Image (cartoon, rainbow, N blue to C red):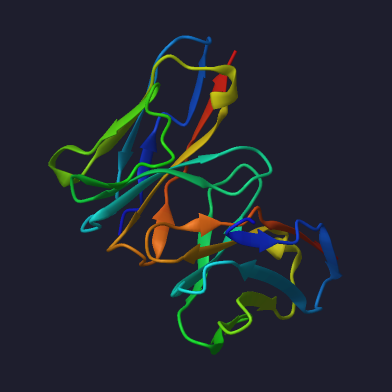
Amino acid sequence: QKEVEQNSGPLSVPEGAIASLNCTYSDRGSQSFFWYRQYSGKSPELIMSIYSNGDKEDGRFTAQLNKASQYVSLLIRDSQPSDSATYLCAVFPGNQFYFGTGTSLTVIP
Amino acid sequence: EAGVAQSPRYKIIEKRQSVAFWCNPISGHATLYWYQQILGQGPKLLIQFQNNGVVDDSQLPKDRFSAERLKGVDSTLKIQPAKLEDSAVYLCASSFGRGNEQFFGPGTRLTVL
């Protein structure tokens, strides 16, 4: 079982819609969770971190964490074509970061 | 605030040759990470430093890969000899401490022919 699992997609949404990205993790002791955006040919860029159960909002982005169900999600409201990228989920169980394989998102104008 | 710096940005070598990558983390960041990212996959940790000490190198192929972080700042990652399967992007990241938000450099794209 992989430490972090993401649906590889591709996920396509129309411009202005809500994009929902999901991630599950295996280590129940995980305390820190991160979402990164990676454009093709570029390095990962931190979008959000979340540490406590519930929602955390930052602009158009909302991260949701449910430790009991071992999942973390990212919602992107009012999706823009510039949001088209691969979104990586990262989890820190206490020793090292584990990354998912990423979900490819395409926002259609 | 300057970000994580890496060089070179691109490198093409023949198999069995050696190559070295350099990383300068964000000022004040004690933790430095080297990752390997193969196309279509997420970054995989190779080695993690806390200041100038190695915290985790369990996934570093030690027969050919080596890394050091002298004086707890800059770091170098070396591959000797390179294999075809080492073709990947090598990413350096740094964070204030272990488990804190980490920030990535631009990466080095290595092609082994």
Q: Position of residue A15 (x, y in %)?
A: 82, 72
Whether residue A8 is visible here, answered yes or no, is yes
* Residue at 61%, 57% in the rendered image: A100
Where is residue B13 drawn, in percent x and y?
A: 51, 13
Q: Residue at x 31, y 62 (%)?
A: B98
* Horizontal relation, residue A19 to residue B21: left or right: right
Using the rendered view, name the quadrant where residue B94 is placed: bottom left
**Horizontal and vertical percent position of residue B76:** 30, 32
- The answer to whether residue A108 of the structure is visible from this angle is no
The residue furthest left is B71
Residue A2 location in percent, x, y?
A: 62, 56
Viewer-nearest residue: B54 or B97:
B54
Quadrant in the picture for the N terminus of chain A: bottom right
Quarter of the figure with the C terminus of chain A: bottom right
Residue A66's place in the image compared with B56, above or below, is: below
Is residue B76 shown left or right of residue A105? Answer: left
Q: Is residue B79 above or below residue A106?
A: above
Which of these two is toward me, B46 or B31?
A: B46
Please state which of residues B75 and A78 is positioned toward the viewer in this rendering: B75
Q: Is residue B58 left or right of residue B86?
A: left
Write down the quadrant of residue B39 in the picture: top right
